[in-house]
Amino acid sequence: MKIALVEFLNAYPLYFALKNRIIENDFEFFAHPPSVCSLLLRKNEVDIGNVPIVEYANSDKYGIISDCCISSNKQVKSVVLFLKKPLNKIERVKLDKNSNTSVALTKVLFRFKYNISVDYVYGGDADCELVIGDRALERIKTQNGEKLDLAVEWNDMTSLPFVFATWVTNKRPKENVKRIFIESKEWGKNNIEIICESFAKKTDIIDKQECKSYLTKNISYDLTGEKIESIKTFFKYAYACSAVSDNPKLKFI
């Protein structure tokens, strides 16, 4: 099977054991930004993708591998709006093209929480900028000024955690595939130290202790009933403001 991976730190615990063959598998892996992983899945060029949750709304053939996700119970730290002006003065928002979920969440918040009508752009100057992933973790340490953590904003609006990504498949895999993905998630949760040591060797963005704090305090990997309810609520809001093309029923495998 062909598997699309997002090489952001927050995704490592889901697939570290798979990619490093700690858990035996014969998968072929492809690493890309979230938006590219979504496109590959939609075009049937991969079988399973670690994709932004909004991708699920793009096909009625999709299924979600149950009990695995990238989510935040409240503060996520890696999906942030950096403001140049007070919130009520913002007219132009610069989006990040790498994650459609974060883009949709931004639109939901401006429409239903802030009640502000703004223009959205992907380039040029703007009054605030959406930054995601490891770039956000790096920038949040150095940039002064007001910042809005989008998971905090969602929780403040709905009292729910937020699910940013899941394993989505465009076919019905064998039962052992689901088991392998859940085993990989559990291995990742129980071996954060090993994962952080590996990641810290590759980058100067974040050290081992910061990595451990982020993965254990800001990110959650179990797809609980409350998080499923959050996905449904998010799709309802996103569809209402045309941030997604459909409000799909969730199918799990």
Image (cartoon, rainbow, N blue to C red):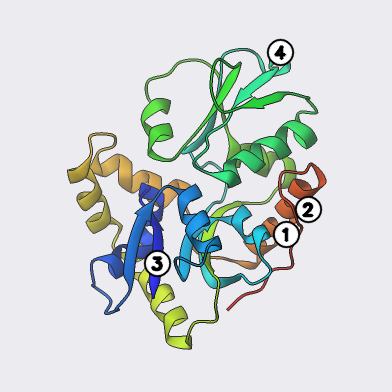
- Seen in the picture, residue 219 relative to 134 is either above or below; the reply is below
Give the SS element for disc 1. Answer: helix
Kind of residue at disc 1: Lys
Give the SS element for disc 3. Answer: strand
Q: CA distance from mark 1 to mark 3?
A: 25 Å
Q: Residues within 10 Å of mark 4 (few under 14, many from 20)?
A: few
Which x, y percent locates residue 163? Answer: 58, 54
Q: Which mark is residue 26?
A: none
Which x, y percent locates residue 113? Answer: 76, 34
- Proximity of marks 2 and 1: CB atoms separated by less than 8 Å: yes
The answer to which of marks 4 and 1 sits earlier in the sequence is: 4
Indicate the quadrant where residue 126 lies: top right
Q: Residues within 10 Å of mark 2 (few under 14, many from 20)?
A: some
- Seen in the picture, residue 241 relative to 222 is either above or below; the reply is above
Q: CA distance from mark 4 to mark 3?
A: 43 Å
Give the SS element for disc 2. Answer: helix
Residue at image location 74% in from the left, 63% down from the top? 248
Q: State which mark lies toward you, 4 or 3.
A: 3
- In this orientation, which residue lies closer to the viewer: 250 or 188? 250
* Quadrant in the picture for the C terminus: bottom right
Indicate the quadrant where residue 107 lies: top right
| Residue identified by numbered label 3 | 3
Kind of residue at disc 3: Ile
The answer to which of marks 2 and 4 sits earlier in the sequence is: 4
| Residue identified by numbered label 2 | 236
| Residue identified by numbered label 1 | 232
Which x, y percent locates residue 223? Answer: 56, 65
Q: Which mark is residue 89?
A: 4
Is any atom of residue 70 visible in this view?
Answer: no
Farthest residue, direction left:
201
* Quadrant in the picture for the N terminus: bottom left
